[in-house]
Structures are given as C-alpha cells and as structure tokens.
Amino acid sequence: MKVLLVSPPRLLWPYMNEEDNYLLPQSLPSLAAVLREDGIEVQVLDCMPEKVGWRSLEARIRAFRPDVVGAGENHALYAGEVLKLVELVKRIDPDIVTVLGGAHFTNLGELYLPRHPIDFIVRGEGEITLLELVRTLRDGDPAAARQVDGVSFLRDGKVETTKPRALIADLDSLPMPAYDLMPMSKYGQAKLLFSPGGATIHHSRGCAAQCSFCVWWTQMADRKQGPDGCETLSARWRTKSVERTVAEIEVLYKKHGQRCLVFVDPAFNINSKWNDEFATALLRKGWPLNWFAFMRADLVLRDEKNGVFEKLVRSGLRHVCIGVERAEDDDLEGWGKPFYSNSRSVQTFDLLKRKYPEVFRQATFIVGVRHETPATLRRQLEFARRIDADYPAFHPATPFPGTALWNEAKAKGWLEIEDFDYFDLSTPVMASEHMSRDEIDLAMIEMAREFVRPAWLVKGLLSRTAYRRNMYSWFTLVSARVFIDSLRQRLNPFRHDNYTRLVRPAWYDG
C-alpha cells in the first residue's frame, strides 16, 4: 500500500511568496508519521516550497503510482486547487483512492462529494481515522472502509457519514512528526519575516472557546451524535506535554536549523502551569530562539500577574498576535468572546509596549459586521491607534463554512459572493445593514492608508529591537516590490487590490 500526501500548487499572497517565506504545513508530517509507523509506504509532496507546478505534479504522481492520494484544506480560499488535484488523480488512474480532510471539506461533504471524484472525506482530527481507513483499503475490504469512524463518502448518489471519531486523548502518543519527509531546507528562508529560519509547530489542539466567526475550533471539536443522527460540537482543548513539545523543538533546532518558531495553536496560552514549565524548559536549554504565538489578551494579563509572561519573553517570545476583533464589548460577547473586553485589550497592549518593547504587537480586527456604519468603522481605527499595535489587520467579516456565522448568513441570505476563491480575508463577501460591499472595501483601504503612515514606518524601522526592525523592513521591502511589479505590468500601483489579490507564480503550470 502506497500513500501520497499532497499540498498542491496554489496562487500566492503578494506578502507571502517564494522570495519571502514558506511555512511548514503541520498536517502533512503528522499524518505521514502515523502511516509510516504502521509500515505503510508514504511520500509527502509539498508543491509550494518545491515549486512543483501542475505538469510536474502529474509526472510525480505517475512515477510514484500511489494507491491512495490524500490532501486537505482548512482555508476555503484554496479549496478549488485541492479539487483540481482529485480531478487530476482520477484522470491518471481512476482506481487511486482520493481522500480529503481539513476543516473546509469536513464541513462541506454534502456539497463536494456528489460533484467531485472524492472517495472519502476524513472529518475532524485526522491521524487515527486516516490510518484505519488506509488499513482497510490495504486489506482489500471496501465495505470495512465505509465503517471507519469519522468519514463521509458517497453511496448510490447519497452522502453517508459514519459516527464521529473520538479525539485523541494523549497527544504525546502520536509519533514524532515526519520532518525527514518534508523539504525542510526550503522552509523559512526569509531573511526578515519570522527570521531567522521560521518553522511552524503546535503544542495544543482545539480551543477553550466557541467564537461564532471562527472555524479553527470546529476542526478539533468534540463531536457527539444524537439519536436523530445530528452532530453537536463542543470546544475541547488538549496539549502535548512540555517534554514532548521541547523534543520537537530540538529536532527542528538541531537537525533542521530552524531558529524562529511559529506556533499555530489557536490560543497558545490557555494553561498557565504549562506556560511556566515551557518557559523554564526553554531557558534551561539556552537556545537562541525567536517565537511567535496567537495569544488571548486576558491570559496575557493573568500570566503577567503570576510572573509567567516575563519568563515566556525571556525564553524567546518576540511576536504576539491577539484577536482584539472589535472596540465594542457587546460585539465580543455576542460572538462568544465574553472573556475579552475593550479594557483588557488596552491593558495588554499597554503592558507589551511599556514593559516588553522587544515583542512585536499584532492585532486583528473584524470589520464589515452586520450593523457596521462609517462611524463604527472609524471607531475600530481609533481603537487600533489607542492600543498602538505595531500592525493592526482589518479583516472583513467572512462566514466560513462550519461556523455559526456561516449558518446565519446562509439562512438569512446575507452572502453576496459564495465563490470561495474570494474568501481571502481581504474581500468583503457580504454587505452590512448600512453599507454595501464596495463601501466596506473602500473604507478598509482608507483605514489601512490612515494607519500605515511614514511616521509609523520610520518608528518601526528605527526600533531598538532586531525582530521589530526586521518586521517593518520586511513590510517595506515587499510593499516596494509589489509597487514596482505593478509599474512593470502597467498597472496602477496605488490600487489596493494589487496588494491583496493572489499572484500566479511562474512555475504554477509547469
């Protein structure tokens, strides 16, 4: 039994391209390690860092002659290229079993299975489900494959789903990610972004909250099936041990030369005891690391009070991204974030600025919400200035499949664009009650222009801390390159979409 796991070619963000960085996809080495431990021959092909275009990908598939091809996607934006992959695989050999996973396909099996040559969708956490599925296929028992927990498939034109897969209770029981199957030397090559040598990693799965706009927590949710066959999801947070996490870091650090860790946990700092022990372990190792994490503002304040946050910074924490989301507390509570508040965000960013100037302060905001007006948009910009974030990202409210926001938007007919190619967190896909999509889009452009001013840029470029200088330098250089590329293509370099639209790399079709 031969399994090929693929991340197919895709278009590039202007601010994250081959001249800047590629980051290690966490799913591929984790899934590959579980299959290999069971004696299954597995190869991994991450097309982006290897610059493998569609013709080259076809040749690689033909050469390996896999029995199973697996792929997945958590981002709606790239779903189309995964679907292009399964079409390609079936043209090469209809007998190859196609398996998809990730949050997007987990939540849209009813849409995709009848329309595309997908044999199975692995729903939710994937390692054990994929392993059991491949075992049954290896044994030549297709009937047994359709009894594996946690899968969806098409039978007689009807989508069927087996009972939910139980979450893995002990994450330490999973084998070490198969980094040796990945093109590790081609990740994190940027000299400025997530520098030096950035690689993703995670210590936890799931989340302690169920924010109505967020799909991340649903992929690792605890799923229960009721008597009527309907599933209910509840948030569940699990973590690897500190020892296991540090062991993974050691492999990345010593064997692969990675010096900047990008933790992709939805909320890194849930458990204060774990945070304390982790910081202590890294300090004992003495490795010169920079690391990034998504953190909750209220828990930053908690860990500052008990002395843990200071240790995290000393251990190498250099970049914090906090979901501030809105200036209004009522919005936060309505979205399932009652633990957040205007005052907590102010306190957190004031703490970072005053006591930890070496930490880059990033904030995310959600704009274009249902009740949005020009006045409320102005309030978000003023709040971003008040907290003095190094970089505030203003994203349009986007109802991703699987979220409560998606269900409401579909039920009430709010969606004006349903093509997932536009679900890029830059393009508004629905209007508010008071503003059209175009008005929201133009307002977002103006907000970005008002924040990104010469004084803001010079202040960052002259920062005393190397990491912050690098981030501002990266932003400056990439913006200049996009500006020059626009001129070369005889495009207006002042058009906002030149800086947000996806770019087709030269090798994409090759």
Image (cartoon, rainbow, N blue to C red):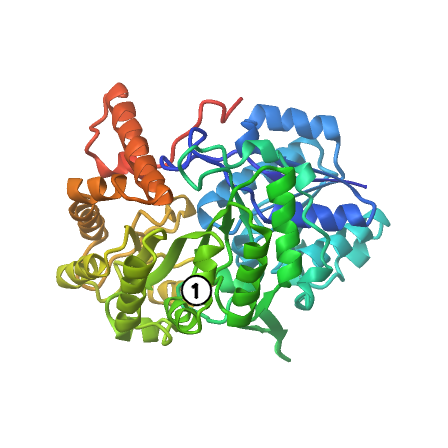
Q: Which residue is mark 1?
A: 309
| Count of numbered tags | 1
Residue at figure coordinates x 45%, y 22% from the top left: 506
Question: Which quadrant, please, contains the N terminus?
Answer: top right
Determine crowd level at label 1: few under 14, some 14-19, many 20+ residues with C-alpha closer than 10 A: many
Q: Is residue 207 above or below residue 423?
A: below
Q: Is residue 485 above or below residue 461?
A: above
Secondary structure of the residue carrying tag 1 is helix
Residue at figure coordinates x 30%, y 29% from the top left: 482
As drawn, which residue projects farthest toward the bottom? 227
Q: Is residue 381 left or right of residue 397?
A: left
Q: Is residue 126 above or below residue 450?
A: below
Residue 149 point in image, percent of width and height: 71, 64
Residue at figure coordinates x 42%, y 63% from the top left: 310
Q: Is residue 166 left or right of residue 17?
A: right
Which is nearer the eye, 494 or 430?
494
Q: Is residue 12 left or right of residue 6?
A: left
The reply to whether residue 239 is in sight is yes
As drawn, which residue projects farthest toward the left? 375
Residue 263 point in image, percent of width and height: 51, 53
Which is nearer the eye, 493 or 104?
493
Residue type beneath disc 1:
Phe
Residue at figure coordinates x 55%, y 61% from the top left: 280
Q: Is residue 249 above or below residue 62?
A: below
Q: Quadrant of residue 186?
A: top right
Residue 188 point in image, percent of width and height: 50, 37
Residue 6 point in image, percent of width and height: 62, 39
Which is nearer the eye, 462 or 396?
462
